[in-house]
Image: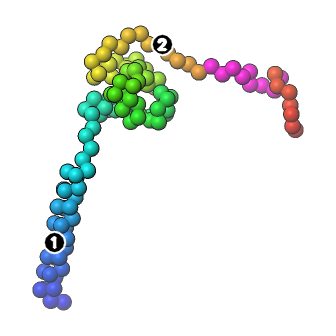
Amino acid sequence: MDFKEILIAVGVVCLISLIVGVALGIAEKVFHVEVDEKEEKVREVLPGSNCGGCGYAGCDALAQAIASGKAPVSSCPVGGKPVAEKIAKIMGEELGEMTRKVAYVKCDGNSDKRTVDYN
């Protein structure tokens, strides 16, 4: 193998990487999406469990709703009052009073209360 062939191969790889780098830089400018600063700050405060207990698809969706004003600052049941206080501070709002929500299952849950349909 000749040293000249190695230099040609290195030059071609460098040229390709330069072209791809310029293309990626242009694409970043063309397809750039603005994100609200408040949304990012709210997302950092949320616990990140993505449980859906708030009624949204996950913490990202809840952060977007809080930042746009569609959801109250106390929407996260997992974070509770400490998280709600931090979000209220970010949004510049008063927290107010929070009531803790607890699930209530109306079913008695045993076979003495329910007739057996099948064996």
- Identity of the residue furthest to the bottom in this view: 1
Q: In this view, does 76 lie to the left or right of 94?
A: right
Nearer to the camera, 41 or 3: 41
Residue 54, position in %: x, y? Answer: 47, 27
Amino acid type indicated by mark 2: Thr
Residue 86 can be seen, yes or no: no
> Is 40 rendered above or below residue 17?
above
- Looking at the rendering, the stretch of residues picked out in magenta corresponds to 104-112
Residue lying at 72% horizontally and 22% vertically, measured from the top left: 107
Please name the residue that numbered disc 1 is placed on: 15
Q: In this view, does 13 lie to the left or right of 109?
A: left
- Local SS, label 1: helix
Residue lying at 38% horizontally and 10% vertically, measured from the top left: 96
Residue lying at 47% horizontally and 36% vertically, measured from the top left: 57
Residue 21, position in %: x, y? Answer: 19, 61
Nearer to the camera, 25 or 58: 25
Residue 76 can be seen, yes or no: yes
Where is residue 43, by image quadrant?
top left
Residue lying at 44% horizontally and 35% vertically, measured from the top left: 58
